[in-house]
Image: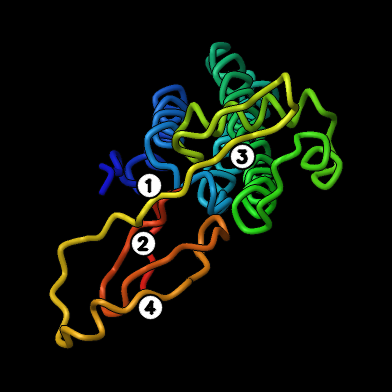
Amino acid sequence: MEKKGTKWGWTIFWLIVFWPVGLFLVFKKLASDKSVLMSGKTGGISAAGWILAVIGVSGFLSAIFNPEADPSGAALGLIMIAGGAVILKKASNTKRTAIRYKKYIDLVVNQNVRSLDDIASSAGVSYDIAVKDLQNMIDLGYLRDASIHQDTREIILYQYVPVLYAQESTNAQASAQEVAVKCPGCGANNVVFVGKVSECEYCGTPINA
């Protein structure tokens, strides 16, 4: 199982207290925890962005309309507003990326589509964007051992046996039975063992049957 890194609670804490550190942690978490991006759940990040922006606006207005206020308060307020805007934009981009990546996984993994032109058409993006997105997914580990063949305009994907967590089963016969389960994170079809918790081979989300 992959190491998930910094918990979201600490990440959101730093987004509010000192947003540059928080934003760095967001990028780091998205790079190290594939299930985070695929979930598309950016409510916490968006909330932190709005809180930071509201605090910034409040500080800016207070500095502008209060003659006795420290002039640096206005600059600090603008910086916090900018930080909130950056965080909100990142949350929005993450959600859009999750939607596209899930569409690609559904096409490539579940529907076994290999033509890059067909993938781009079905995803509603240009050929170049589809190739760029798929290559990013390969580089980030969403499509392990996949490769893009520009000469044939296809993507080649090899399937894997799911990685299992160490969890004892009370029924030895059931533990040997395999069933197909749809990942709640990325939507990919996985073959898992009944009675054991498995990790989605595409996004790392825990799944069981």
Query: In terms of sequence position, does the residue under pointer 3 or pointer 1 come before the other?
Result: 1
Quadrant holding the C terminus: bottom left
Residue drawn at x 31%, y 79% is: 177
Q: Can you tell which mark lies on residue 206?
A: 2
Query: How would you rate the neighbour count of disc 1 (Cα within 10 Å): few for under 14, some for 14-19, many for 20 or more?
Result: some
Residue 103 horizontal side relative to residue 174, left or right:
right
Q: Secondary structure at mark 3?
A: helix
**Which residue carries the number 1 mark?**
8
**Which residue carries the number 3 mark?**
94
Query: In terms of sequence position, does the residue under pointer 4 or pointer 3 come before the other?
Result: 3
Residue drawn at x 37%, y 35% is: 32
State which mark lies toward you, 4 or 3. 4
**Location of residue 4 by image quarter:** top left
Q: Amino acid at mark 1?
A: Trp
Q: Can you tell which mark lies on residue 209?
A: 4
Q: CB atoms at circles 4 and 3 under 8 Å apart?
A: no
The relative height of residue 90 versus residue 104 in the rendered view (above or below) is above
